[in-house]
Image (spheres, rainbow, N blue to C red):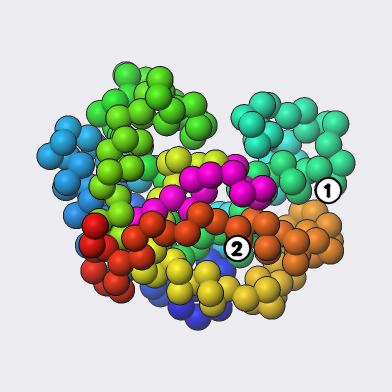
Amino acid sequence: MNPLELTGRARSHIIHIDEPPCSLHFEVVTSFLGMRDAARRDGIDLQAISSYRDYDRQLTLWNRKWRGERPLYARDGRLLDHARLSGPQLVDAILAWSAIPGGSRHHWGTDVDVVDASAMPAGYQVQLLPSEYGRDGVFARLTAWLDRHMGRFGFFRPYGSDRGGAGVEPWHLSYAPIATEAMEALSLSVLRAAIVQGDMLGKETVLDRLPEIYTRFILAIDPPVVPGRRGKPALA
């Protein structure tokens, strides 16, 4: 991927599929659909409620959280009072659950947030909170299935444990063969250039702390359990 693709400012690497509706890197589609078919055979309706996300969409999400138009949660899931947060605290609160524009793995088309549509009661509103994927959560069965099977399709959870940066996201899957290359290519200078050119609220605070943010929130992930091979499902 080139710098524009890495930072969500070009989508030449992305294709859209209709069923299930999502947009992915062209080398990810086959593995994702293969995993979905396998899940369906076990009674799970695997759906991607978020897939490719471009720079502008990530920027809108960031700015709405900065202005207090969307809720902010602590790393332990507690709702935060926006009015009581300083600029640096706002940055930390947003980064717990949302990447900076240009620094989201969703820009690569390799990452998806997944649910089991068959497990949701009528009218259920997904919160994307760890409790939904825990032992007593609505998506507990999905979590167990992914634990057993996602690796053989090349997927892993980059935010599966607390590494002091982003919060734990059991719903967030990443396709290792392509995402690993993308993360290596997303240098600090490429990320800085994307931020400088955007209209991000809190930009100066972010730029002042960018080396720390880059290390804590982009590089600090759980490694793939089964790396797999480019363009093919990983072998368990």
Marking on residue 88: 1
**Span colored in magenta:** 155-167
Neighbour class for label 1 at 10 Å: few (<14), some, many (≥20)? few
Q: Residue 4, located in which quarter of the rendered image?
A: bottom right
The spot of residue 142 in percent (x, y) is 31, 35
Residue contact at pointers 1 and 2, CB within 8 angstroms: no
Marking on residue 219: 2
Q: How many marks?
A: 2
Q: Is 166 inside the magenta-drawn segment?
A: yes
In-front residue for pair 3/177: 177
Amino acid, disc 2: Leu
Q: Nearer the viewer, mark 1 or mark 2?
A: 2
Image point (83%, 48%), residue name: 88
In-front residue for pair 96/81: 96
Amino acid, disc 1: Pro
Q: Is residue 128 visible?
A: yes
Q: Quadrant of the C terminus?
A: bottom left
Is residue 177 placed above or below 132 in the rendered structure?
below
- Magenta stretch: dominant SS? loop
Image point (26%, 63%), residue name: 234
The spot of residue 188 in percent (x, y) is 68, 73
Image point (27%, 43%), residue name: 148
Question: From the viewer's perspective, is 186 left or right of 65?
Answer: left
Question: From the viewer's perspective, is 171 left or right of 208?
Answer: left
Considering every residue shown, the one lying at the far bottom of the view is 2
Considering every residue shown, the one lying at the far left of the view is 41
| Disc on the earlier residue, 1 or 2 | 1
Q: Is residue 203 visible?
A: no
Q: Is 41 inside the magenta-drawn segment?
A: no
